[in-house]
Image (spheres, grey):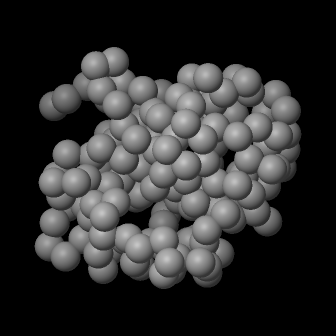
Amino acid sequence: MAPRLYFGVESQIQEYIDVGTLTNEALQRLHDEWRSRSRGRLFPARADFDPAEMSYILGNLSLVEVRRHPLRFFFRVHASNVAARVGFDMTRKFLDESPDARFRSVILDHYLRTLDERRPIAARHEQEVTDRTVLNCEALALPLAHDGENIDMVMTGVSWR
């Protein structure tokens, strides 16, 4: 068995939930589209999604490249609504460049769990305080793979509550 990557911290700032219990319709729809675009593969590719068809979630959607050797997460696009809420834009930056250490830990744990479990991972944040903001949202991390098997990107949707 491969070693686990994620911290697996079950704390007050990270409550993982079953994807089926997401309360936001846009996140439910995003998950449904992810499943339908897999078409028999383990994971869909980024190219399987057309941004023009995703207006219901744009602004709340991030695309994050999984870089390896060493493992790092690079924000190709950081959700503009998330950037406005947290007070910084991570577009074209690595996660470890985030100015909010606690936010960085929460996101890192979510992404590592997604890589380890090789499936969509949902989290709920209820009035959780980071270094710079209060999180009150649901988040869904969806693994993507250009070859259908090796995860090379994480698509993340966020819904503020």
Q: Is residue 86 left or right of residue 150?
A: right
> Residue, x 49% and y 44% (percent of image)?
76
> Residue, x 73% and y 24% (percent of image)?
99
Q: In this view, does 41 lie to the left or right of 24?
A: left
> Residue, x 42% and y 27% (percent of image)?
72
Q: Is residue 118 left or right of residue 65?
A: left
> Residue, x 61% and y 23% (percent of image)?
97
Front-lying residue, 147 or 141: 147
Q: In this view, does 49 lie to the left or right of 111?
A: left
Residue 65, horizontal then vertical, whole percent: 40, 41
Residue 77, horizontal then vertical, whole percent: 55, 49
Residue 93, horizontal then vertical, whole percent: 56, 31
Q: In which quarter of the image is residue 58?
A: bottom right
Quarter of the image that includes the C terminus: bottom right
Front-lying residue, 107 or 123: 107
How many marks overall?
Answer: 0
Image position of 100 with respect to 120: above or below: above
Front-lying residue, 91 or 124: 91
Quarter of the image that includes the N terminus: top left
Residue 45 seen by the camera? yes
**Farthest residue toward the top?**
70
Image position of 26 with respect to 11: above or below: below
Image position of 75 with respect to 30: above or below: above
Residue 109 seen by the camera? no
